[in-house]
Amino acid sequence: MANIERLRVFAAHTVQSVARHGQDEAAVLSAITPALATLVSRDDFLPEAYAKPHPQYYQQYLLYGDPAQNLSIVSFVWGPGQKTPVHNHRIWGLVGILRGGELSTDYTEHEGKLVPGETQLLSPGRVVAVSPRLGDIHQIANAHDDTVSISIHVYGGNIGRVRREVFLPETGEVKPFISGYANSDVPNLWAA
Ligand code: FE2
C-alpha cells in the first residue's frame, strides 16, 4: 500500500513554501527543490491509480491542487517510447524523476527559430526546473522503449488549465494547448 503520508507531508511543505515566499520564484524553487528530491528518492508513496500508463498517450494525473490555484502537484506517466510535444508552461515548474528515466531537451529562441540544446538523461532522484525566467520550452521523452517512466511535477498554478503552446520547430508552427488532467478524482492525502 502507498505511503500516502509522505505525499501529504510534501504537499504541506509546498503549500507553506508558496505562502511564505509568494511571488519570489527563486525562493519558492529553493524551498521546494530539496523536498521534491527527498520525495522522489523513495518510490513508495504513489497510489497505483496514478501510476497507470495509457497505451497511446502519456498521462498527467493531478495529485493535489490548492483551491486558490496557486500550485498543483502532478504525476506524469510515460508508457514505453512516449514523449511530449515541444511545449511551454508559462508558470514555474519542478520535475522530479521517480521511476525509469527521462530524456529532456531544452529549446531556446534564436532569430525567431527554436533551437534544441543538448538532450539530458534524467535518472530517478533528479530534480530540474522550468519557468519563463529560467527557460520555459522543452520536450520530455521516456528514455526507455520497454518500460514505464514516471516523474512528479510541481507547478506555480493550475497547470491543467493554463493556456500555453506546443511548437513544431521544423515548420515554426505554434498551436494553443490546454493539457487538462487524466483523472477526475484525487488521492485522499488524509487517509493515513
Ligand atoms: Fe514540461
Image (cartoon, grey):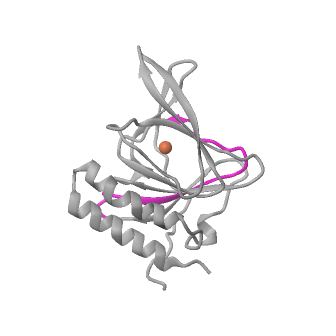
Q: Position of residue 107 (x, y in %)?
A: 48, 29
Q: Residue furthest top?
A: 111
In this rendering, position of residue 137 left or right of residue 149: left
Q: Position of residue 34 (x, y in %)?
A: 40, 61
Q: Is residue 81 above or below residue 71?
A: above
Taking the spot 41% from the left edge, 41% from the top edge, the residue there is: 89
Q: Quadrant of residue 16?
A: bottom left
Q: Is residue 80 magenta?
A: yes
Locate the N terminus by quadrant. bottom right
Q: Is residue 38 above or below residue 100?
A: below
Q: Position of residue 160 (x, y in %)?
A: 44, 51
Taking the spot 41% from the left edge, 37% from the top edge, the residue there is: 136
Q: Which residues are magenta?
A: 67-87
Taking the spot 45% from the left edge, 77% from the top edge, the residue there is: 189
Taking the spot 60% from the left edge, 52% from the top edge, the residue there is: 123
Q: Which sits in the foreground, 13 or 155? A: 13
Q: Position of residue 69 (x, y in %)?
A: 32, 58
Q: Is residue 46 magenta?
A: no
Q: Residue furthest right?
A: 146
Q: Is residue 131 above or below residue 159?
A: above
